Amino acid sequence: MGSTGSGNFSDYSGRAGGSSASGKSMQDRCATAFNTDIEDVATSPYYKRHQQVPPLGTPLKIEAARRLEVKDEEGLLVGYLPTGLHYLFTCIDSGYSYEGVVAASSPIPIPTVNADFAPQ
């Protein structure tokens, strides 16, 4: 389990703000919807409580803590966002919030969740 980052400091470049390598401004990146896999699902409180992954369409939200946490409507932790999305810390600090839904999930071979998120 753990991070899906490349192990390079470039994984963390978005935390400081500014422009991305693709040439988009931080404002553009913050205002863009995205799809991502959620990390550490198998060890999450959600999985431990329900003994299953969240079903398709389950509403999710992102909260900034020590890591970017993905929670269900009850506030139960489902997992974490990958380090490549750490630019979202800056977006959240700037007033953005992100809500989404489970786009795909599977309990085997390991519990996995994929989600669509959009800025609010």
Image: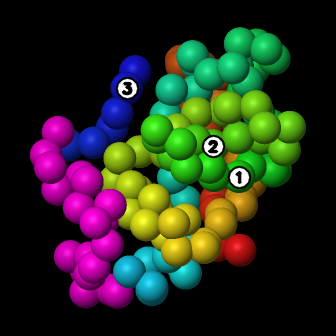
Q: Position of residue 66 (x, y in %)?
A: 46, 38
Kindly identify which numbered label has been placed on residue 61. Answer: 1
Q: Nearer the viewer, residue 88 or 23?
A: 88
Q: Residue at x 74, y 49 (%)?
A: 60
Residue 56 in view in this figure: no
**Stretch in magenta:** 7-25
Q: Is residue 87 above or below residue 31?
A: above
Q: Position of residue 82 (x, y in %)?
A: 41, 45
- Rounded to the nearest whole Å, what is the CA distance between mark 2 and mark 1? 6 Å
Work out which quarter of the rendered image holds the C terminus and state it.
bottom right
Give the quadrant of residue 87. bottom left
- Contact between labelled residues 1 and 2, with CB atoms less than 8 Å apart: yes
Task: Confirm whether the magenta stretch covers residue 23.
Answer: yes
Q: Nearer the viewer, residue 102 or 98?
A: 98
| Left or right of 58, for residue 96 | left
Give the residue number, with chain letter if any, for mark 2: 70
Which tag, 3 or 1, sits closer to the chain's start?
Answer: 3
- Rounded to the nearest whole Å, what is the CA distance between mark 3 and mark 2? 15 Å
- Contact between labelled residues 1 and 3, with CB atoms less than 8 Å apart: no
Q: Nearer the viewer, residue 90 or 5?
A: 90
Q: Residue at x 71, y 12 (%)?
A: 48
Q: Position of residue 99 (x, y in %)?
A: 71, 61
Q: In the structure shown, which secondary structural element does the residue marked by tag 2 occupy?
A: strand
Q: Residue at x 58, y 33 (%)?
A: 79
At label 2, the amino acid type is Val
Give the residue number, with chain letter if any, for mark 3: 2
Outermost residue, left direction? 8
Q: Position of residue 39 (x, y in %)?
A: 49, 34
Label 3: few (<14), some (14–19) or many (≥20) C-alpha neighbours in 10 Å: few
| Left or right of 42, for residue 61 | right
